[in-house]
Image (cartoon, rainbow, N blue to C red):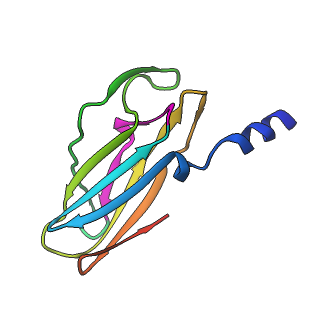
Amino acid sequence: MDVLLFMEKDIPHPDEVYKFQAVIVKEKIFIRWDIEPDSYLYLDKFSFFDKKLNTYLKASFARGEILEDEYFGKVEVFFDTVEVILDIGKEFKKEIIVTYQGCNQKGYCYKPIEKKIIIEKSEIKIII
């Protein structure tokens, strides 16, 4: 049991591993993750939910790398950085829930991570 507790203390918080940023430019949100070495994010674990419209927003991604993952099999992942652009239209009062998940090549995975992006009058707040 002591070994498990020691290991958990050595696992960095996901906000340290996946540095999340979002900015608004005109009618778009630019979202970026800076990913620590030996860590990655899964392409198929990203989602962007617009609470006001009650729908998922579509995002296009650059091509990732194919990885044989011990938990999910053959998957597309992102190392180093990943960026997406969401078209939010002209209405600047929104709440978007961003979900993502990743692992570290040393053998641990994070549960899905959720951030809220609150947009009011061209200002953006990120809620952890």
Q: Quadrant of residue 64?
A: top left
Picture residue at 36% right of the left edge, 45% below the top: 46
**Residue 123 sits above or below residue 1 on the image:** below
Image height of 57 relative to 93, above or below: above
Quarter of the image for the N terminus: give it: top right
Looking at this view, name the residue that lies furthest to the bottom.
121
How many numbered marks does the figure carry?
0
**Residue 104's x, y, as percent?**
54, 33
Q: Position of residue 15 (x, y in %)?
A: 53, 53
Q: Residue at x 79, y 36 (%)?
A: 4
Residue 85 in the image: state x and y as whole percent.
Answer: 22, 53
In the image, residue 64 sits, relative to residue 11, either above or below, namely above
Q: Is residue 20 above or below residue 77?
A: below
Question: In the displayed structure, does residue 39 sit left or right of residue 30?
Answer: right
Nearer-the-camera pick, 37 or 53: 37
Picture residue at 66% right of the left edge, 41% below the top: 11
Queried whether the magenta region covers residue 45, the answer comes back as yes
- Residue 1 visible, this angle: no
What residue is at 80 percent from the left and 41 percent from the top?
5
Q: Kindly tell me whether residue 53 is visible in this rendering.
A: yes
Query: Magenta part of the protein: which range?
Result: 37-50
What percent of the width, then of the height, locates residue 93? 25, 77
Q: Quadrant of residue 109?
A: top right
Q: Is residue 20 magenta?
A: no
